[in-house]
Image (cartoon, rainbow, N blue to C red):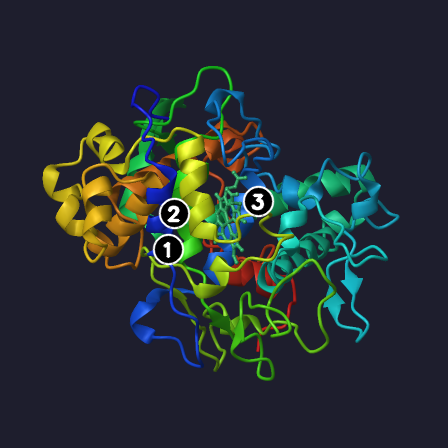
Amino acid sequence: MFRNLPPLLPDRPDLEALAREMIEPQPTGEEDPVADNPDIPAGFTYVGQFVDHDLTFDTLSQLQQDNDPDALVDFRTPRFDLDSIYGRGPDDQPFLYEDDGVHLLIGRNKAGEDDLPRNVKGRALLGDARNDENLIISGLTLGVLKYHNRVVDTPPLAGLAPVRRFDEARRIVRWHYQWAVIHDFLARLVGTEVIEDILHPVSFKVPAGTSSKTIKTLAVLPRFFHWRSRPFMPVEFSVGAYRFGHSMVRGEYELNDQVQNIPIFAKPPEEDLRGFRELPAGHSIQWALFFQFEGSKLTPQPSRKIDTKLSFGLNILPENVAAGIHALAERDLKRGRALGLPSGQAIARTIGLPEDLILHAADLKPLPDHLIQVFGESTPLFFYVLKEAEKISGGRRLGPTGGRIVAEVFIGLLRADPSSYLNTEPTWQPKAGKFGARKDGEFTITDLLRFARVRID
Ligand code: HEM
């Protein structure tokens, strides 16, 4: 995205020292509420992870060596097309589908509770295996599978021939999901003004009888994310800015009224929320503990602030989540180096930010002096995006550099996708009473989950 900028190549021991400064203490009971983000309920962290798995999958780059970003292959399509759910469709990956080739498979655990579909080894059958990495992302993924199945069974789709029924349902699911990603998720991260600045309301005139009619539509006006023939996944997004979600992960979660204060990851034999296994009995999620549902008496847990601290569990990831290096912050920082990302300050200047919106050495306090010396004026992008969110937005949403990258890439990719609503029918809006939307022009993650008939409270 910012090809002309030089890579930042700090010494690895300095990155390791920086990563060690990014770990929250091990939780003991209640988490410190000062680091909670009152504006973003905890469920949106996993919407973020779900979106990541829809857009990007790097299986090629090596942590310990320099890699050429142009040689990377994104093993997901850089589109909001839910390939992480549908795979390549019922003809090519029939093991994700019921025999009718229309419904997605849903599984059950031994206790008879709904779970992801699994093979005899307990491995989830999914378009993207990472959607079973922890019990919360598994539950959210199950919600999307159920949403698809409910759409399929809703008239007029229920009456169509199988192939049309599937194609039409997938289109409807994708468009509603895309709407929620932009207007419910991205809006919380960057604010609606930034979205409107990129997804710009415009109008044009058409002849209509003897006079003319004004048509209102949307034009996409990215300033920094451009591509020639095909849109791509910028490393500044996948290896830098969009990893901000790692800092939103709580140390512990309440799943339901029985299962409370469980760490996201802990050292066995302590119980945790790790995935890649059948849903343990009694662990199905009450979603009103993760999102604000109108009419529910439950209060959702907040996500953690977008800041330079990651929860303790992310420092001791299991081997099947992160082989070799188990500390996520260290992986994020080393991946940034391995892919030659520019510093946060260099990008902020290219964006044209004024000096008072660019971080300097003093802003990196309370890091130890030697790290401030090394990183003060050229900070690794991942750390920079988190620090500016903390300093400029109080940790409640992204800052000017991270927010601009994330918003431009989201909207740019949506515009580039030949089958997205924004490309095929830019004035499309969810309609009240249809597929979970409660008002015209409004569709949220909670609408999706409610329509999917998951457990709410
Ligand atoms: C419990 C929650 C999460 C865990 C355990 C987790 C774990 C991981 C791990 C192990 C990697 C690979 C790191 C590497 O080797 O470079 C990764 C990559 C990534 N994560 Fe997360 N993550 C979580 C949540 C999130 C969230 C909430 C977001 C965003 C909102 C996110 C965004 C990303 C992105 C963009 C990548 C790079 C993906 C790629 O290019 O293949 N993650 N995560």
Distance of mark 3 from mark 1, alpha carbons?
26 Å
| Residue 16, numbered label | 2
Residue 205 locus on image (x, y percent): 34, 24
**Amino acid on which disc 1 is placed:** Arg
**Any part of residue 16 in sight:** yes
Seen at 53% across and 53% down, the residue is: 326
**Any part of residue 42 in sight:** no
Residue 305 locus on image (x, y percent): 34, 62
Query: Callout 1: helix, strand or loop?
Result: helix
Query: Callout 2: helix, strand or loop?
Result: helix
Residue 333 locus on image (x, y percent): 40, 43
Labelled pair 1, 2 in contact (Cβ < 8 Å): yes
Examine the image and state in which quarter residue 340 appears: top left
Find disc 1 in the rendering and name its residue. Answer: 20
Find disc 3 in the rendering and name its residue. Answer: 53
Query: Callout 3: helix, strand or loop?
Result: helix
Distance of mark 2 from mark 3, alpha carbons?
26 Å
**Residue in the foreground of this view, choosing between 391 and 321:** 321
**Amino acid on which disc 2 is placed:** Glu
303 versus 426 height, above or below: below
Q: Is 212 left or right of 368, judged from the image as shown?
A: right
